[in-house]
Image (tube, rainbow, N blue to C red):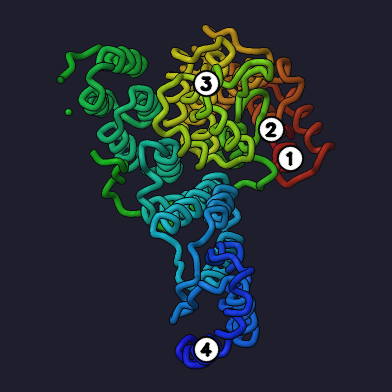
Amino acid sequence: MHSALKPRFGILATSLVFACLVCASSASAQEPSDADLEALRFYIAEDNEDAIRSEIRRLQIQYPNWVVPDDLSNLQRDVPSANIDRIYQLIEQGEFAAVRDAIDATATSYPDWSPSAELLRTLALAEAQSSFDTAIENQESETAIGIARSNPALLSCERVNNAWLLAERYVALSQADTALGVYSGVARTCTDPDILVSTLEKASAVADAQELGELADAARLQAPAAADRITTVETRLRAGMGAEPRATTDGQSATIPLPDAAAPRPDDAEAQPDPLEPADTATASETAPALSLRPALRPRSLSRRVTGPPPQAALAPAPASQPASQGSAALAQARQAAERGDWRQCLALSASARSGDIVSQRGWCALNLDRPMQALTDFRTGASTATTQRTRIDSSYGAALAMLQLGMVEQAAGIAATTHLLPDQRLEIESQILDRRGVDAFNRGDFRQAIAYFDELERVTGIVRRDLALLRGYAFLNSGQRASAKAEFMRLHDQMATPATRRALSQTLDR
């Protein structure tokens, strides 16, 4: 298009000389601004030759000193940052079809532009994370394992929860050795003591005393400063196995290595119970002599994202009467980005911050970008160095939320026990702790303790989620309280009848 138009544009420029001389005295000597060229850029993108000529005539009359470029494509400007920011926002929202539409539209409007490698990596990782989360939620073990193997970036230490969930999927497929390999990968890769301690605790369900010792040795090499803490945890876990304490021995990849074991065979998966209905998260085994449930992976409340300000959560703003960190422009800018949900910009604005107030705000933005490890680090800094008591409390609350996302329940409970949280903050943390403890107790077969946790959760919050109520019903059944189980299942069935509630009621019938 451009080569065909060049000769005609040359003739047009010559024919306009007289007109330009006539108006030169009244025209500004400056060249057209970026806004002045907007219409011409649009017509070039549309390949509308008549409109292009007309717009060039108008500009040359208004700006007689302006020289029309030989190659009109040189007038095309860079893509506005707002366009790129919008694409990243759509990625963060999981609107992947809209992301591709936005990329296509941007490429059409700006032919010289193409998405950066970083943008494409971000999109690919976000899609992989979404698919992995769906597979985990649906307990589709083979699918989740395949996604993790095809996307190693999902297994970074920053996303360690993915590795823990992956190990649980291997356990569900009766591949305990492979699950242990995943835990070993975490212990030999990550350096955060909280991650290493949690990994030891999780691995103890599938490891023997010797294997646990090897993991603890690797963890001590990764975090020498936390060696005593790791040894204390190892000793406690060994005691639970009936093993004596032992003498310990005294060491980077950003990605947790997967074990070398082959992917699970289809016949392994077929031996597992059928997937559960989405509306309910537990179902009884109809073949086991003693009633027991397939373990739930995680409470749903712990997998949600902080996408808006829950009770004093996502932004954790200081009281309105207080200046933003004593007039800090950086804090004000970071908060403004957070208020419009631009978490990535918030992180960019606070990347080099050292102030506890700004670092705490950065923690909330990291949490909203599903970066709980980064958020935890920032919240710890904010809790110890922020300038106001309110920000220090909010930072402790954020640290507890991040710990719960990482499965660090006892550590979160420690914060709740030692921090004067606000009432709504304490309710949120304690309800999540009771949720997780109840599920964990159920999964290890301590049914009476699970009932106690679920009852306390209902007392504290006034409600108990449907999936947890179903678990409580099976806990009643497994502990011999058939009448209570039937009453719980009937209540759920009356609210909304599903195959899961019908199956649960059938288990209460006398055999």
- Tell which of 405 and 334 is nearer to you: 334
Amino acid carrying mark 3 in the image:
Ala
Mark closer to the chain start, 3 or 2? 3
Badge 3 density bin: few <14, some 14–19, many ≥20, Cα 10 Å: many
Measured from the top left, where is residue 205 in percent x and y?
39, 28
Q: Name the mark nearer the viewer: 4 or 2.
A: 4
Label drawn at residue 454: none
Q: Label 3: which residue?
A: 400
Amino acid carrying mark 2 in the image:
Leu
Q: Distance between the residues labelled 3 and 1?
A: 34 Å
Q: Residue furthest right?
A: 494
Q: How far apart are marks 2 and 1 (CA)?
A: 8 Å
- Give the SS element for disc 2: helix
Q: Residue at x 50, y 29 (%)?
A: 330
Q: Name the mark nearer the viewer: 3 or 2.
A: 3
Q: Label 2: which residue?
A: 470
Mark closer to the chain start, 2 or 1? 2
Q: Distance between the residues labelled 4 and 3?
A: 72 Å
Marks 3 & 2, CB-CB < 8 Å contact: no
Whether residue 211 is visible to the viewer of this picture, yes or no, is yes
Amino acid carrying mark 1 in the image:
Thr
Measured from the top left, where is residue 172 in percent x and y?
45, 42
Q: Label 4: which residue?
A: 14
